[in-house]
Image: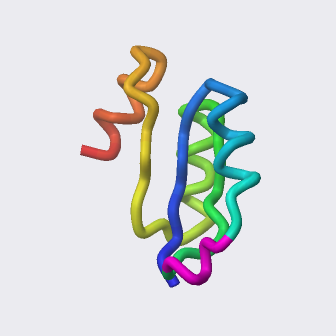
Amino acid sequence: MYRLLIVTEKQAVRDMFAAMEGWESMGFKLPRLRQSTDEALECMRKHHIDAIAIDPSPAFEDLNRHVD
């Protein structure tokens, strides 16, 4: 099972992903949802993450540089 991290400030987007069902049938564990760079980095330190989706907002420029 793949582990996905989704990082966005938008509550509606986090709610949408949290409400989605069938992750395991697509080969994913329930994604981890975070709303800040600090939360995302802490999550990556604590958990194995296979893929990360980051909101293109300027608020996450530091996180994008870190992941690159």
Q: Nearer the viewer, residue 67 or 23?
A: 23
Q: Is residue 34 above or below residue 3?
A: above
Residues in magenta, as a range: 22-26
On whether residue 25 falls in the magenta region, the answer is yes
Residue at left offset 53%, top offset 55%: 5
Q: At x 55% / y 59%, what residue is drawn? A: 45
In percent of width and height, residue 57 lies at 43, 19
- Residue 55 picture location, percent across and down: 45, 31
Coordinates of residue 20 in the picture (x, y in percent): 68, 58
Residue at position x 32%, y 46% in the image: 67
Q: Position of residue 14 (x, y in %)?
A: 67, 40
Pick the residue in front: 37 or 17: 17
Q: Above or below — where is 61 with respect to 64?
A: above
Q: Residue furthest top?
A: 58
Q: Which secondary structure class fits the magenta region best?
A: helix
The residue closer to the viewer here, 10 or 45, is 10
User: Residue 9 vs residue 59: left or right?
Assistant: right
Toward which corner of the image does residue 25 lie, by quadrant? bottom right
Query: For residue 31: magenta?
Result: no
